[in-house]
Image (cartoon, rainbow, N blue to C red):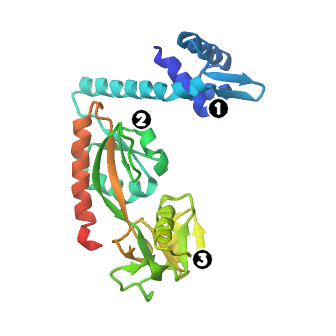
Amino acid sequence: MDLRLLRYFLAVCEAGTLHGAAAVVHVAQPSLSRQIRRLEQDLGFDLFDRSARGLALTAAGRRFRPVAEDLVGRAAQAGATAHAIARGTAPELTVVTAPTTATDIVAPFIVRAGPDGVIGNVVEAMPEHVYAAVATGRADFAVGTRIPPAEFRTKVIGHAYLWAQMRRDHPLADRETVDIAELVTQPLIVMSRAHGVRQMFDSAAASAGLRFTASLETESPPLAQALAAAGRGICILSDDPRFGLTTTPIETGTGPLVITLFGVWDEMHYASAQIERCLDEMEQFLVETYPPNSV
């Protein structure tokens, strides 16, 4: 199967139009249209419904898309393997993770690993899209917080904590933990409802039979921290503190609110052993950086 045609197909899927895809793949629109028709002839079914409103994937096209993504991703892995063999050196790896994890965990780990570290690039994605980047070959492995798909190798590398972050002069700042029942009585600065941290906190409050009204809601963790540092309330985040804020674990009665960190990769990846060693080192880094008895 012609990988070039598969890449054209995926470009049209991403762009939503032939015009947009043509600009991405640097092919004239009429030529791109012919290439998509050729792929459909090779496959024996239509990939797109064509109407005056534009292109829409057919049912067969929707079913075929993940197959095409897998083939293109594996081809990219094969190419990287060939280049690594030709150079006689180990390839640098790309990890995909959420922005907070990239800032607070992956970037410091890269510094700690020094010049011999194997991570050469970081792709940031929303938590719900992290593992898709591994499936499509955009990244070699992932560090995610959601339950990984069954087809991947998985390793628990550590935990992040959901913190109540507040000014050091706040009455609750000297607590070892703060109970969620007491916390919801305070002015709270929370993320938007689409954010995983907000969903986790809302779920914990609901499980405890609690309700609360947020004082402020934002989509920016640094802004939430800035508002807390300005004395506007307590922010609920998993990010490392900024602006002199102190962090206090949130107690639910069954333990603190904890986010599990998963290392995820394809066992058939050419650098599978190297990825696993990297994740082992990241696990040790997390134990040293966020020791369990600090919670």
Residue sitting farthest toward the right: 52
Name the residue beneath numbered marker 1: 16
Q: Nearer the viewer, residue 58 or 87?
A: 58
Q: Measured along the vertical axis of the image, is residue 194 above or below residue 250?
A: above
Foreground mark, 1 or 2?
Answer: 2
Q: Label 1 amino acid?
A: Gly
Q: In screen coordinates, is 123 left or right of 230?
A: left
The image position of residue 115, as x and y in percent, is 24, 47
Q: Is residue 226 above or below residue 143?
A: below
Q: Label 3 is placed on what type of residue?
A: Ser
- Report helix, strand or loop for mark 3: loop
Nearer to us in this view, 229 or 269: 269
Name the residue carrying label 3: 215
In which quarter of the view is residue 189 placed? bottom right
Residue 240 vs 75, above or below: the answer is below
Mark 3–mark 1 distance (CA, rounded to whole Å):
39 Å
Amino acid carrying mark 2 in the image:
Ala
Tell me how far mark 2 sits from mark 3, CA to CA.
40 Å
Neighbour tally class for label 1: few under 14, some 14-19, many 20 plus, Cα within 10 Å: some
Q: Position of residue 293 (x, y in %)?
A: 24, 72
First in residue order: circle 2 vs circle 3: 2
x and y, in percent, of residue 272 in the image: 26, 36
Quickly name the residue at label 2.
135
Quote the CA–CA distance across marks 1 and 2. 21 Å
Q: Is residue 116 above or below residue 227?
A: above
**Residue found at x 55% / y 22%:** 8
